[in-house]
Amino acid sequence: MKIVYFTHSLSSCWNHGNAHFLRGVLRELIARGHDVSVWEPEGAWSLQNLLADHGETGLHAYRQAYPELSSRTYTPLAQLERLVDGADLVIVHEWNDHHLVARLGSIRRNGAPFTLLFHDTHHRAVSEPASMQAYDLEDYDGVLAFGETLSEVYRGWGWQGRVWTWHEAADTLHFHPPAQEQDREGLVWIGNWGDGERTAELEDFLFRPAQETALPLDIYGVRYPDEAKDMLARYGVRYHGWAPNARAPEIFARHLATVHVPRRFYSTILPGIPTIRVFEALACGIPLVSAPWEDAEHLFRAGQDYLVARNGAEMTRQLREIQNDAGLREHLVNSGLETILDRHTCAHRVDELLDIVATLRPQTAISTSHLRPSHMSIVA
């Protein structure tokens, strides 16, 4: 198939988590022989911030890890018909301009033969519903939502039978345990500050437990305001700023454990949606402890793949156990990795995507007989 994906940015993961999953999926599609084109807007916010902070060197890790990937930019006045000419499948990520989304729908309405899907990987459907409902999706064939609770929102907006739950996953070609173990020390957390969406949770489930267990804590991420940096300093946290996502495996490999602290929307209104970091951490073989989060879709095995802390005191206790029990660490690593490889790789998600497209384009023969078997999580 000829596949065209419109993203905010493929090259920059600066506060742009969709780039993580997208890179793995596109690499898998290319490996299977599909013709993939990626377009992103000129002057993409994420890329501009990355270049302002780190210059071209900030792109080196991505380019080295994904040499087969590339993207091109379009201008607001671009002739979109040319960009999607000959496409069999066009996917548009939700972090794109409303005008672009509407224009692609218009091309589809006027007879373009491609399948057109909208890809939603954010909580704005509940946090900013007016903004999301302003997208003109009337002529789209369907929506790919990254969690069942988000799919339910779209069904409430009239998308019954045309929304599929398409979870994120780990690119296990890049995210995997180290080939050779090294000494591990302390905790690591890779995440952005999040506009105050989880400030109290970070203090209760990460900063204070790390201090109480005397485990050194390293934090990587962006958009930390001065008050956040002051809080980190009070708790003795080592803040390193942004790190390319392509470097995450080597960062995980230096640390004893990591912690999942979901944004408030994913622990309340949209339960069951993990961040991409959960998939990546388990794929890299690092023990993980989660703050309160309901795995409503049973993606993982709580207590086996990761531990759950109901409060800060429990987080402190469980981090101590991980610190002192090598057998527990080994069990969590093996169990988490088993679940990732069995259910949550980008190869699994490509299987799912091709099955979705096959239901929408029954006349298009898409052979998947040569692909590895997968456990599907598609819900229409």
Image (tube, helix red, strand yellow):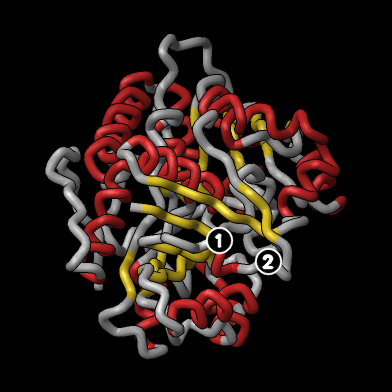
Count of marks placed on residues: 2
Give the SS element for disc 1. Answer: helix
Which of the two residues, 134 or 263, is positioned nearer the viewer here?
134
Q: Where is residue 181 shown, x and y percent of the image?
A: 44, 11
Which of the two residues, 85 or 370, is positioned nearer the viewer here?
85
Residue 162 vs residue 292: left or right? Answer: left
Q: Looking at numbered disc 1 in the image, what kind of residue is underneath it? A: Leu
Q: Where is residue 67 shown, x and y percent of the image?
A: 54, 29
Q: Where is residue 325 shown, x and y percent of the image?
A: 38, 22
CB within 8 Å, label 2 to label 1:
yes
Residue 189 vs residue 258: left or right? Answer: right
Give the SS element for disc 2. Answer: loop
Disc 1 packing (10 Å; few <14; some 14–19; many ≥20): some
Q: Going 59% across and 39% down the picture, which residue do you hit?
A: 189
Instruction: Measure the alpha-carbon separation of dots 2 and 1.
Output: 8 Å
Asked where in the image residue 164 lies, by quadrant, the reply is bottom left
**In the rendered image, which residue does mark 2 sit on?**
78
**In the rendered image, which residue does mark 1 sit on?**
83
* Name of the residue lying farthest toward the left: 369
